[in-house]
Amino acid sequence: MRLIRRFEERCIELVKAGEIIGGIHPYIGQEAVAAGVCAALRPDDVITSTHRGHGHVLAKGADPAGMMAELAGRATGLNKGRGGSMHAADVSLGVLGANGIVGAGAPIATGAAWAAVRAGSDRVAVSFFGDGAVNQGVVLESFNLASLWSLPVVFVCENNGYSSTVTVEDLVAGSITGRAEAFGMPAVSVDGMDAEAVFAATRECAERARAGGGPAFVECRTYRFEAHHTWEHRSFVRYRTKEQVDEGRRRDPVRIQGERIPDADRVRVDEEVEAVLESAVRFALDSPKPDPADALHHLYATGLRPRDGVTTSA
Protein backbone atom coordinates (compact mmCIF):
# COMPACT_ATOMS: atom_id res chain seq x y z
CA MET A 1 0.00 0.00 0.00
CA ARG A 2 2.86 2.35 0.78
CA LEU A 3 4.44 1.47 -2.57
CA ILE A 4 1.22 2.32 -4.43
CA ARG A 5 0.79 5.61 -2.53
CA ARG A 6 4.32 6.80 -3.18
CA PHE A 7 4.27 5.53 -6.77
CA GLU A 8 1.23 7.69 -7.48
CA GLU A 9 2.73 10.71 -5.76
CA ARG A 10 5.90 10.38 -7.79
CA CYS A 11 3.83 10.01 -10.97
CA ILE A 12 2.03 13.27 -10.23
CA GLU A 13 5.42 14.94 -9.90
CA LEU A 14 6.45 13.56 -13.29
CA VAL A 15 3.18 14.72 -14.86
CA LYS A 16 3.85 18.25 -13.62
CA ALA A 17 7.42 18.01 -14.91
CA GLY A 18 6.19 17.03 -18.37
CA GLU A 19 7.77 13.56 -18.23
CA ILE A 20 4.42 11.70 -18.20
CA ILE A 21 2.46 13.04 -21.14
CA GLY A 22 -1.32 13.22 -20.97
CA GLY A 23 -1.64 12.91 -17.20
CA ILE A 24 -2.94 10.09 -15.01
CA HIS A 25 -5.95 9.09 -12.93
CA PRO A 26 -4.42 8.94 -9.41
CA TYR A 27 -5.28 5.98 -7.20
CA ILE A 28 -4.43 7.80 -3.96
CA GLY A 29 -6.89 6.90 -1.21
CA GLN A 30 -7.98 3.58 -2.69
CA GLU A 31 -4.84 1.56 -1.96
CA ALA A 32 -6.57 -0.83 0.45
CA VAL A 33 -8.74 -2.21 -2.35
CA ALA A 34 -5.93 -3.19 -4.71
CA ALA A 35 -3.75 -4.53 -1.89
CA GLY A 36 -6.54 -6.40 -0.12
CA VAL A 37 -7.93 -8.01 -3.25
CA CYS A 38 -4.63 -9.07 -4.79
CA ALA A 39 -3.34 -10.44 -1.48
CA ALA A 40 -6.26 -12.87 -1.55
CA LEU A 41 -5.36 -14.24 -4.98
CA ARG A 42 -2.98 -16.91 -6.21
CA PRO A 43 -0.14 -15.99 -8.57
CA ASP A 44 -1.91 -17.73 -11.46
CA ASP A 45 -5.21 -15.90 -10.92
CA VAL A 46 -5.92 -13.09 -13.36
CA ILE A 47 -7.25 -9.55 -13.08
CA THR A 48 -8.59 -6.85 -15.35
CA SER A 49 -8.12 -3.24 -14.38
CA THR A 50 -9.42 0.24 -15.12
CA HIS A 51 -8.31 3.70 -16.22
CA ARG A 52 -7.32 4.16 -12.54
CA GLY A 53 -5.30 0.98 -12.54
CA HIS A 54 -1.73 1.56 -11.37
CA GLY A 55 -2.54 0.21 -7.91
CA HIS A 56 -4.02 -3.01 -9.28
CA VAL A 57 -1.05 -3.66 -11.55
CA LEU A 58 1.48 -3.04 -8.77
CA ALA A 59 -0.46 -5.06 -6.20
CA LYS A 60 -0.47 -8.04 -8.57
CA GLY A 61 3.32 -7.89 -8.59
CA ALA A 62 4.35 -5.77 -11.57
CA ASP A 63 7.85 -4.30 -11.61
CA PRO A 64 7.62 -0.64 -10.44
CA ALA A 65 10.49 0.35 -12.75
CA GLY A 66 8.81 -1.19 -15.78
CA MET A 67 5.51 0.39 -14.80
CA MET A 68 7.09 3.82 -14.35
CA ALA A 69 8.83 3.52 -17.71
CA GLU A 70 5.52 2.56 -19.30
CA LEU A 71 3.81 5.68 -17.96
CA ALA A 72 6.71 7.79 -19.17
CA GLY A 73 6.34 6.34 -22.65
CA ARG A 74 9.71 4.59 -22.68
CA ALA A 75 10.68 1.54 -24.72
CA THR A 76 11.62 -0.32 -21.51
CA GLY A 77 8.09 -0.08 -20.14
CA LEU A 78 5.89 -3.09 -19.41
CA ASN A 79 4.34 -2.68 -22.85
CA LYS A 80 7.22 -0.92 -24.59
CA GLY A 81 5.68 2.48 -23.87
CA ARG A 82 2.62 1.75 -25.99
CA GLY A 83 0.08 1.07 -23.25
CA GLY A 84 0.65 4.06 -21.06
CA SER A 85 -1.29 4.86 -17.92
CA MET A 86 -4.66 3.42 -18.95
CA HIS A 87 -3.59 0.24 -20.75
CA ALA A 88 -0.69 -1.22 -18.77
CA ALA A 89 -0.57 -5.03 -18.74
CA ASP A 90 1.65 -7.91 -17.69
CA VAL A 91 0.13 -11.18 -18.85
CA SER A 92 2.93 -13.17 -17.20
CA LEU A 93 1.57 -12.00 -13.84
CA GLY A 94 -2.07 -12.44 -14.75
CA VAL A 95 -2.61 -8.73 -15.38
CA LEU A 96 -4.75 -8.86 -18.51
CA GLY A 97 -4.65 -5.11 -18.84
CA ALA A 98 -6.00 -1.85 -17.57
CA ASN A 99 -8.67 -0.39 -19.80
CA GLY A 100 -9.65 3.16 -20.66
CA ILE A 101 -13.24 2.15 -21.46
CA VAL A 102 -15.46 2.19 -18.37
CA GLY A 103 -16.51 -1.35 -17.48
CA ALA A 104 -14.68 -2.96 -20.38
CA GLY A 105 -12.63 -5.24 -18.13
CA ALA A 106 -15.72 -7.12 -16.90
CA PRO A 107 -16.32 -9.15 -20.08
CA ILE A 108 -12.59 -9.81 -20.42
CA ALA A 109 -12.44 -11.24 -16.89
CA THR A 110 -15.62 -13.22 -17.53
CA GLY A 111 -14.09 -14.65 -20.69
CA ALA A 112 -10.90 -15.52 -18.82
CA ALA A 113 -12.94 -17.31 -16.17
CA TRP A 114 -14.82 -19.23 -18.86
CA ALA A 115 -11.50 -20.19 -20.49
CA ALA A 116 -10.19 -21.45 -17.14
CA VAL A 117 -13.22 -23.70 -16.70
CA ARG A 118 -12.87 -25.03 -20.25
CA ALA A 119 -9.21 -25.81 -19.57
CA GLY A 120 -10.00 -27.65 -16.34
CA SER A 121 -8.21 -25.06 -14.23
CA ASP A 122 -9.38 -23.69 -10.88
CA ARG A 123 -7.94 -20.28 -11.69
CA VAL A 124 -10.07 -17.29 -10.59
CA ALA A 125 -10.55 -14.04 -12.49
CA VAL A 126 -11.14 -10.67 -10.83
CA SER A 127 -12.60 -7.63 -12.53
CA PHE A 128 -12.00 -4.22 -10.97
CA PHE A 129 -14.32 -1.36 -11.94
CA GLY A 130 -15.72 1.84 -10.50
CA ASP A 131 -19.21 2.74 -9.33
CA GLY A 132 -20.04 4.36 -12.66
CA ALA A 133 -19.46 1.07 -14.47
CA VAL A 134 -22.53 -0.54 -12.89
CA ASN A 135 -24.54 1.53 -15.38
CA GLN A 136 -22.71 0.02 -18.35
CA GLY A 137 -24.59 -2.67 -20.25
CA VAL A 138 -21.51 -4.78 -20.86
CA VAL A 139 -21.00 -5.13 -17.10
CA LEU A 140 -24.56 -6.34 -16.60
CA GLU A 141 -24.16 -8.74 -19.54
CA SER A 142 -21.06 -10.10 -17.82
CA PHE A 143 -23.02 -10.59 -14.59
CA ASN A 144 -25.63 -12.51 -16.54
CA LEU A 145 -23.22 -14.87 -18.31
CA ALA A 146 -21.10 -15.40 -15.21
CA SER A 147 -24.17 -16.40 -13.22
CA LEU A 148 -25.70 -18.55 -15.98
CA TRP A 149 -22.47 -20.46 -16.47
CA SER A 150 -21.39 -20.41 -12.82
CA LEU A 151 -18.01 -18.92 -13.72
CA PRO A 152 -15.16 -18.36 -11.23
CA VAL A 153 -15.07 -14.58 -11.43
CA VAL A 154 -15.13 -12.01 -8.62
CA PHE A 155 -16.47 -8.59 -9.57
CA VAL A 156 -14.91 -5.84 -7.44
CA CYS A 157 -16.61 -2.44 -7.51
CA GLU A 158 -14.52 0.42 -6.13
CA ASN A 159 -17.21 2.84 -5.02
CA ASN A 160 -15.30 6.05 -4.37
CA GLY A 161 -18.46 8.14 -4.38
CA TYR A 162 -17.95 9.83 -7.73
CA SER A 163 -18.21 9.01 -11.41
CA SER A 164 -15.67 11.58 -12.54
CA THR A 165 -17.29 14.67 -10.98
CA VAL A 166 -20.85 13.43 -10.37
CA THR A 167 -21.97 11.73 -7.17
CA VAL A 168 -23.12 8.12 -7.07
CA GLU A 169 -26.46 9.26 -5.67
CA ASP A 170 -27.10 11.29 -8.81
CA LEU A 171 -26.20 8.45 -11.20
CA VAL A 172 -27.04 5.07 -9.67
CA ALA A 173 -30.63 4.03 -9.03
CA GLY A 174 -31.19 1.44 -6.34
CA SER A 175 -28.10 -0.03 -4.72
CA ILE A 176 -24.81 -1.11 -6.24
CA THR A 177 -24.91 -4.54 -4.60
CA GLY A 178 -28.50 -4.87 -5.78
CA ARG A 179 -27.32 -4.90 -9.38
CA ALA A 180 -25.38 -8.10 -8.74
CA GLU A 181 -28.05 -9.66 -6.53
CA ALA A 182 -30.55 -9.26 -9.37
CA PHE A 183 -28.56 -11.91 -11.24
CA GLY A 184 -28.59 -14.32 -8.32
CA MET A 185 -25.04 -13.45 -7.39
CA PRO A 186 -23.85 -13.23 -3.75
CA ALA A 187 -22.90 -9.62 -3.04
CA VAL A 188 -21.24 -7.97 -0.08
CA SER A 189 -20.36 -4.35 0.77
CA VAL A 190 -17.19 -3.78 2.78
CA ASP A 191 -15.08 -0.95 4.16
CA GLY A 192 -12.75 -0.20 1.27
CA MET A 193 -10.44 1.83 3.49
CA ASP A 194 -9.53 -1.27 5.49
CA ALA A 195 -7.25 -3.66 3.59
CA GLU A 196 -7.95 -6.53 5.96
CA ALA A 197 -11.71 -6.22 5.47
CA VAL A 198 -11.22 -6.21 1.71
CA PHE A 199 -8.86 -9.18 1.95
CA ALA A 200 -11.28 -11.25 4.04
CA ALA A 201 -14.24 -10.60 1.73
CA THR A 202 -12.23 -11.31 -1.42
CA ARG A 203 -10.68 -14.48 -0.05
CA GLU A 204 -14.11 -15.88 0.83
CA CYS A 205 -15.47 -15.04 -2.63
CA ALA A 206 -12.38 -16.36 -4.44
CA GLU A 207 -12.36 -19.63 -2.51
CA ARG A 208 -16.05 -20.12 -3.21
CA ALA A 209 -15.53 -19.42 -6.92
CA ARG A 210 -12.51 -21.72 -7.06
CA ALA A 211 -14.55 -24.53 -5.58
CA GLY A 212 -17.19 -24.20 -8.30
CA GLY A 213 -19.58 -21.93 -6.41
CA GLY A 214 -19.82 -19.39 -9.20
CA PRO A 215 -19.33 -15.61 -9.32
CA ALA A 216 -19.53 -13.10 -6.50
CA PHE A 217 -19.59 -9.34 -6.12
CA VAL A 218 -17.67 -7.16 -3.66
CA GLU A 219 -18.45 -3.47 -3.25
CA CYS A 220 -15.54 -1.63 -1.63
CA ARG A 221 -16.66 1.69 -0.17
CA THR A 222 -13.62 3.89 -0.58
CA TYR A 223 -12.67 7.49 -1.28
CA ARG A 224 -10.49 9.13 -3.87
CA PHE A 225 -8.25 11.71 -2.19
CA GLU A 226 -6.81 13.19 -5.36
CA ALA A 227 -8.23 14.55 -8.61
CA HIS A 228 -10.26 12.35 -10.94
CA HIS A 229 -7.51 13.13 -13.45
CA THR A 230 -4.46 15.35 -13.13
CA TRP A 231 -6.00 17.80 -15.61
CA GLU A 232 -7.94 19.08 -12.60
CA HIS A 233 -4.70 20.60 -11.32
CA ARG A 234 -4.94 23.06 -14.22
CA SER A 235 -8.68 23.40 -14.69
CA PHE A 236 -9.48 23.89 -10.98
CA VAL A 237 -12.88 22.25 -11.46
CA ARG A 238 -14.78 22.15 -8.19
CA TYR A 239 -17.26 19.42 -7.35
CA ARG A 240 -16.14 18.71 -3.77
CA THR A 241 -15.50 21.17 -0.97
CA LYS A 242 -12.24 21.19 0.94
CA GLU A 243 -14.19 20.07 3.99
CA GLN A 244 -15.51 17.04 2.11
CA VAL A 245 -12.05 16.02 0.98
CA ASP A 246 -10.61 16.55 4.47
CA GLU A 247 -13.34 14.34 5.92
CA GLY A 248 -12.60 11.67 3.32
CA ARG A 249 -8.91 11.82 4.15
CA ARG A 250 -9.63 11.30 7.83
CA ARG A 251 -9.59 7.53 7.31
CA ASP A 252 -6.37 7.11 5.36
CA PRO A 253 -6.02 3.42 4.40
CA VAL A 254 -2.22 3.59 4.35
CA ARG A 255 -2.18 5.01 7.88
CA ILE A 256 -4.76 2.49 9.09
CA GLN A 257 -2.70 -0.44 7.82
CA GLY A 258 0.58 1.12 8.88
CA GLU A 259 -0.58 1.36 12.48
CA ARG A 260 -1.04 -2.41 12.54
CA ILE A 261 2.67 -3.11 12.24
CA PRO A 262 5.55 -2.25 14.60
CA ASP A 263 7.04 1.23 14.16
CA ALA A 264 10.45 -0.18 13.24
CA ASP A 265 8.93 -2.32 10.48
CA ARG A 266 6.98 0.64 9.16
CA VAL A 267 10.12 2.79 8.99
CA ARG A 268 11.98 -0.01 7.22
CA VAL A 269 9.17 -0.48 4.69
CA ASP A 270 8.99 3.26 4.02
CA GLU A 271 12.74 3.44 3.42
CA GLU A 272 12.66 0.42 1.10
CA VAL A 273 9.79 1.92 -0.88
CA GLU A 274 11.64 5.21 -1.33
CA ALA A 275 14.70 3.37 -2.60
CA VAL A 276 12.64 1.28 -5.03
CA LEU A 277 10.85 4.32 -6.43
CA GLU A 278 13.98 6.42 -6.70
CA SER A 279 15.48 3.63 -8.77
CA ALA A 280 12.27 3.27 -10.80
CA VAL A 281 12.13 6.96 -11.68
CA ARG A 282 15.80 7.00 -12.62
CA PHE A 283 15.34 3.90 -14.78
CA ALA A 284 12.33 5.41 -16.55
CA LEU A 285 13.91 8.77 -17.29
CA ASP A 286 17.17 7.19 -18.44
CA SER A 287 15.39 4.79 -20.79
CA PRO A 288 15.02 5.49 -24.53
CA LYS A 289 11.77 6.53 -26.11
CA PRO A 290 10.30 4.19 -28.75
CA ASP A 291 11.71 4.51 -32.26
CA PRO A 292 9.06 6.03 -34.57
CA ALA A 293 10.18 3.54 -37.22
CA ASP A 294 8.70 0.79 -35.03
CA ALA A 295 5.30 2.44 -34.68
CA LEU A 296 3.54 -0.31 -36.61
CA HIS A 297 5.15 -3.16 -34.67
CA HIS A 298 3.34 -5.18 -31.98
CA LEU A 299 -0.10 -4.62 -33.48
CA TYR A 300 -0.90 -8.30 -34.07
CA ALA A 301 -0.27 -11.37 -31.95
CA THR A 302 1.31 -13.11 -34.93
CA GLY A 303 3.83 -10.33 -35.34
CA LEU A 304 2.44 -9.43 -38.74
CA ARG A 305 2.79 -5.76 -39.60
CA PRO A 306 -0.23 -4.34 -41.46
CA ARG A 307 1.91 -3.00 -44.30
CA ASP A 308 3.97 -6.12 -44.82
CA GLY A 309 3.46 -7.52 -48.31
CA VAL A 310 1.58 -4.47 -49.50
CA THR A 311 2.43 -3.61 -53.10
CA THR A 312 1.48 -0.63 -55.20
CA SER A 313 0.98 -0.36 -58.91
CA ALA A 314 1.30 2.58 -61.20
Image (cartoon, rainbow, N blue to C red):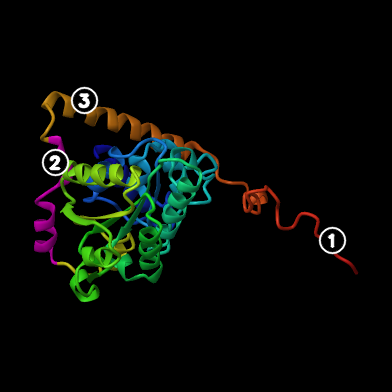
Task: Locate residue 253: give its quadrant.
Answer: top left
Q: Where does label 3 land, which residue?
A: 268
Give the mark toward the camera: 3 or 1.
1
Q: Where does label 2 land, which residue?
A: 255
Mark 3 surroundings within 10 Å by alpha-carbon count, few (fewer than 14), some (14 through 19), many (20 or more) = few
Amino acid of disc 2:
Arg
Residue 139's tag is none
Task: Locate residue 129: give its quadrant.
Answer: bottom left
Q: Where does label 1 land, which residue?
A: 311
Q: Give the Cα distance between marks 3 and 1.
A: 61 Å
State the residue in front, 282 or 267: 267
For the question of whether residue 268 can be seen, the reply is yes
Closer to the chain start, of discs 2 and 3, is: 2
Stretch of the chain drawn in magenta: 241-258
Residue at image location 41% in from the left, 41% down from the top: 123
Give left or right: position of 288 versus 277: right
- Please check the rendered image and state whether residue 281 is part of the magenta-colored stretch, yes or no: no
